[in-house]
Amino acid sequence: ERSKWPKETIDLWNRLYKKDAADIETIQKSIVHHVTTTLARAAYNMDNFTAYQAVALSARDRLIAQWNETQGQLSKADPKRVYYLSLEFLLGRSMDNALLNLGLKDVYAKGIGQLGFRMEDVVESESDAALGNGNLGRLAACYMDSLATLEYPAWGYGLRYNYGIFQQRIIEGYQAEFPDYWLNFDNPWELPRLDISIPIYFAGHVHSFQDEYGVTRHKWVPGQSVQAIAYDVPIPGYDTENCNNIRLWRSKPTRVFDLTSFNEGNYEKSVEDATQAEKITSVLYPNDNTMAGKELRLKQQYFWTAASLHDIVRRFKKSQRDWSDFPEQVAIQLNDTHPTLAIVELQRILVDEEQLNWDDAWEIVTRTFAFTNHTVLPEAMEKWSVPMFEYLLPRHLQIVFDINLFFLQKVEKRFPNDRELLKRMSIIEEAQPQQIRMAHLAVVGSHKVNGVAALHSNLIRDTIFKDFVEYYGSDKFVNVTNGITSRRWLNQANHKLSELITETLGSDAWIKDLDLLKGLNKKVDDKVFQKKWMAIKRANKVRLAELIKERCGIEVSPDALFDVQVKRIHEYKRQFMNILAVIHRYRTIKSLTPAQKANVQPRVVIFGGKAAPGYYVAKLVIKLINSVANVVNQDPAVGDLLKVVFIPDYNVSLAEVIVPASDISQHISTAGTEASGTSNMKFVLNGGLILGTMDGANIEILEEIGEDNIFIFGCLAHEVEDLRYAQRYRGVPMDPALQGVLAAIEKGTFEDPKIFQPLISTLTIGKDYYLISADFASYLRANQAVDAAYKDQDEWVKKSIRCTANMGKFSSDRSVKEYADNIWHIKPFKVVDNQQID
Ligand code: KOT
């Protein structure tokens, strides 16, 4: 029972923590209080960064109040929850989003305005939380926003890396990596829970014994231990009292790390052990769509899944329910195979510690887990070497082998005498040394497996999981097309457009119901509306042009067509093809007469993205882009007709500036390689058109916005195999335009051609795995179609409006609802506003 407060106290509490009661004076008081005490600064000696910190701390106070209320009410009602396990959460900045979701953006803006600060400057002072590589981590962040907004009881679990994705600088055209020590200044968006400390074990051996009933049991006797400390990141929903949580684990040494040797008074060794323990959560692996196979990465995965499961099991046990109720109370979503060890760990807890029998335990496990696959690229498939796994997790290895044995026995029963089938489906790959196929383990241990766009889900059913579909039936394999949060990717990033939409639709309900954007379709021919629409696009382009001037020293005209490709640099994404076509464009322009030049559509080609530090070819692509930019941008014969820009250190905050400023964005992966893509959705939502292939979510975007509003080229996914074959064995010649381009590079038009030789040799006939040559002609044609369409501005603006108007499907609210209804079986839980008692 709550003790009853006097009315004055309740009023004060409400002003401090409730949005409806927030007033400017209370907000200012709280900011000044944090400047003076928490930050120990003189209030008259504030700069933008201090102002940011103080506003953040003040907003954080309110978040904590909401967080407590939500978690308290959830504990009491104890509904089924979902736990989203992701090694990456690419949150970006938090302040603007926190104020938006708390409904306090305007009051805070006024409050700090009166203190002499501009909200934009204060917002800009925050650095990104970049605990992710790309789309996979950003997707997790969008889903957390939607889960909270839709009032689903959900927690994320991840790692609190000391270093996020590296900072990229360009030195002499090459990528150089610098550590992202993002915790330099205190992080106001996390609540350290130093009291929540969970012991996590590694190595050692397995003790087997007979229990009192003569049943053989196993007990893991670990050799090492570390502690997992919880850090909570509150995730407020938009326009709701609900506030969810992402719990990030940090590793700390236990007093005794090496449990066997008791470090025999060896001080140096025990300090060294402590350092080893802290290393576990030190750094995010900077690989996207590739697998590094490092022991430390396996340690990270176990540390994180074991801590998370311990936490989940402890919460479940508080309710005193029967173990068979576990799947009724808990859904766990595996974001790719990275958390697959959670399946093994739960089986170990149930069998070894809770003494359940194997089959009952396994039933609980498989009803609890569901698995999202994000890629079909072979180099991204996680496999762990059995000897390494055995050293770190000896008991888990036994369990993996048992899971595999029982699974294969069932397969054998259904499909007798098919050795090849068993070999293909086995969780263990027979290699030297043996490998554990994490994707197979994830499929076997889950009740649902999903891909992230329609094409991708079909592909995985037909390729990597084909045998599993035949065994389990197709109901287990579903599609959930990715989505993005309209809060960050339209309302925050493109505030002017957002205001125009609200004014036009007569309400801001679209922010929570993105299908309402359809209402813009009837404005497509409205001249006044068109004008406002284009004025906003132009203002966004001016803002990006200023950023380009500041960061790259290149002047670009906002009247040119802005053509953008920003994403991780990877061969399958074909940034190489893009820059090759730019070279072609450059050569074409150089060959024109002045009269012909007058007809050329001016274009600014903008690149951004990081390459994995060990990915040599990808890094060479960056170098080539910069070398081409150097030559083209300084060629007086070209002028404003073509500019090439590589914006360094692409991240979430940069995306928020770049996305609203694009006319065309490129999503040009070889068909069948990009599982979904989500930046494609961000660009189109902001009225930018797509130049793309029939891949990933591009296909569904086309279906929604109509083929007249998107530029599609290239081969189809089902044609890829034949094209590769034809190239390899039938001597298909290289595309002639491409030959010309390569000759220009080899002639030394852009620096010493020797530098680029390894890149060019990826296009050798028979080796052009990503089919750049096969798609090149249609790519050039599509680019011409873009130029022609852009010249007709009257038609272009209509296309742009239709893009935004028909993107409702790609809200992450829709995706999350599909997961909740079809996979997790959870319902919204509305936090009631019971602080306003009187
Ligand atoms: C794989 C291994 C390590 C780190 C990241 C990956 C990864 C990332 N695999 N797939 N992705 C991307 O996931 C996005 C979100 O679903 C997709 O939109 C994108 O197409 C994938 O490439």
Image: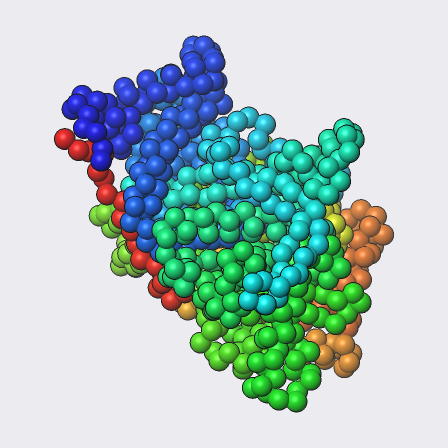
Report which quarter residue 571 is drawn in: bottom right
Q: Is residue 226 above or below residue 288?
A: above
Question: At which x and y percent is residue 111?
Answer: 32, 22
Residue at far front of view: 212
Between residue 116 and residue 172, name the one nearer to us.
116
Q: Is residue 667 left or right of residue 725?
A: left
**What's the colour scheme?**
rainbow
Question: At which x and y percent is residue 419?
Answer: 69, 84
Between residue 314 and residue 10, name the one nearer to us.
314
How many numbered marks, from 0 up? 0
Between residue 123 and residue 265, name the one nearer to us.
265
Asked whether residue 539 is in view, the answer is no
* Residue at 54% in and 82% down: 470
Q: Is residue 665 above or below residue 252?
A: below
Q: Is residue 2 left or right of residue 427?
A: left
Quarter containing the N terminus: top left
Between residue 488 and residue 440, name the one nearer to us.
440
Question: At which x and y percent is residue 183?
Answer: 57, 31
Residue at far left of view: 838
* Residue at 22% in and 33% down: 2
Report which quarter residue 178 is drawn in: top right
* Residue at 74% in and 50% down: 614
Question: At which x and y percent is residue 194?
Answer: 51, 32
* Residue at 21% in and 38% down: 834
Q: Is residue 408 above or below residue 664?
A: below
Residue at far right of view: 754
Q: Is residue 573 above or below residue 647?
A: below
